[in-house]
Image (cartoon, helix red, strand yellow):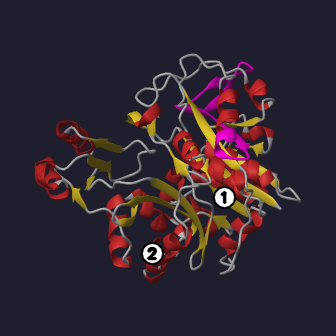
Amino acid sequence: MKILVIGSGGREHAIIRRLAADRPAPELHAAPGNPGIAQLATCHDVSVGDLDGQVRLAEQLRPALVVIGPEAPLVAGAADRLREAGMTVFGPSAAAAVLEGSKSWAKEIMAAAGVPTAASVTVTAAEELAAGLDRVNPLGDVPYVVKADGLAAGKGVVVTEDRDAAVVHAEAVLTAGGQVVLEEYLDGPEVSLFCVSDGTRVVPLAPAQDFKRALDDDEGPNTGGMGAYSPLPWAPEGLVDEVLEQVARPTIAELADRGIPFVGVLYCGLALTSRGLRVVEFNARFGDPETQVVLERLTSPFAPLLLAAARGELAEDEQLSWSEDAAVTVVVASAGYPAAARTGDPITGIRECESHGAHVIHAGTAEADGELVSAGGRVLSIVARGADLEQARTRVLEATALITLEGSHHRTDIARRAAEEATR
């Protein structure tokens, strides 16, 4: 089978790495890919934003399946364009991808589908901010949660106890021409669950937890994600079934009823609050860095799952198989990330890292004069497995210490609390 994957980041490298593990292994192509992906697939110089180029490439390659990784081309209509050209595509249409492209529209869908989520107010003008904050944060309840309504690469959210800081972020979004969604704060641990859908049926993957703050102990600014782990030994029994029944299936059904079938991955970002399950956000694609640990544990064939979804042929009772091992990933971020990431710095130590029992996912790398250099904020994801979370944590941190990237930073507490609780 020939498969074309659109994208250039860590998520796409993880997808391609897992596809390459299928037997028989498919013939893999990527557009544009990255230096890590190039070790597993043929890379083509077609950018993520070049929809015309993607169609031309697909017409040239005639793949059995096109997998679209990032959110931006999905919202721009890449899946529609490729389907119009006769391709079988794993990824939602532009109309369905609005579920991620507009948080306010996602709230409308959740309300119609009866999906539990945070109370919210959508604000379109600065003069509405005070009343909006008072509504979702009555009596000065904190923290304040302020979200840019559109795509923000995981960094459009501010969670703060400082009302002035909340207002500054909201005003910046409004000044840039966007809308703002103000939400009540959801207490309790967060969970990410990917649900593969063919527009009607839904198959869940394994849950994971990611870490958005830049620094240990959840300090520092929000990022696109600094690490993740799976499984979740503390998760309540029946959680996945609860998410399917209360969140994923009602959402997919609501979209289908509106004539907007969702074909691809519905990323359910969830909070297990004191009042029950609540949706924090939806995304219309695999999440990064959770994909790295979820696919690390998947032992079922991956390409047939994606192809069945793209064809509208998922089995209602599809049962995926999973390794009992734990997987932990740690993100190595460049100097200045997330505020102003520095690029062009040499990267060394990958071979030593991988000889230490981990593997390296390229997220923001490039080659310059024959040398591997940083080319983004989140540069690498180091992934390791273990018999339990503590063993996986130890392996990934020892391996990460072997990477050299000037000014880089990474968290050392990914999965620490879960590992400690599991041993009590």
Instruction: From the image, state whether disc 1 or disc 2 is nearer to you.
Output: 2
Q: Looking at the image, which residue is at 68% across and 75% down? A: 311
Residue marked by disc 1: 67
From the viewer's side, name the closer residue of 287 and 388.
Answer: 388
Earlier in the chain: of badge 1 and badge 2, it is: 1
Q: Looking at the image, which residue is at 59% across and 55% down? A: 233
Residue type, mark 2 in image: Gln
From the viewer's side, name the closer residue of 254 and 82.
Answer: 254
Q: Is residue 62 magenta?
A: no
For disc 2, the neighbor class at 10 Å (few under 14, some 14 to 19, many from 20) is some
The vertical placement of 326 against 263, above or below, is above
Location of residue 51 in the rendering, given as x and y in whole percent from the top left corner: 58, 53
Q: Is residue 379 magenta?
A: yes
Residue bounds of the magenta highlight: 364-392
Residue type, mark 1 in image: Val
From the viewer's side, name the closer residue of 310 and 272.
Answer: 272
Determine the residue located farthest toward the front in the rendered image: 424
| Distance between mark 1 and mark 2 Cα atoms | 27 Å
Determine the residue located farthest toward the top in the rendered image: 406
From the viewer's side, name the closer residue of 43 and 311.
Answer: 311
Q: Is any atom of residue 87 visible in this view?
A: no
Q: Which structural element holds mark 2?
A: helix
Residue 246: mark in rendering: 2
For disc 1, the neighbor class at 10 Å (few under 14, some 14 to 19, many from 20) is many
Location of residue 187 in the rendering, given as x and y in whole percent from the top left corner: 34, 54
The quarter of the picture where residue 385 lies is top right
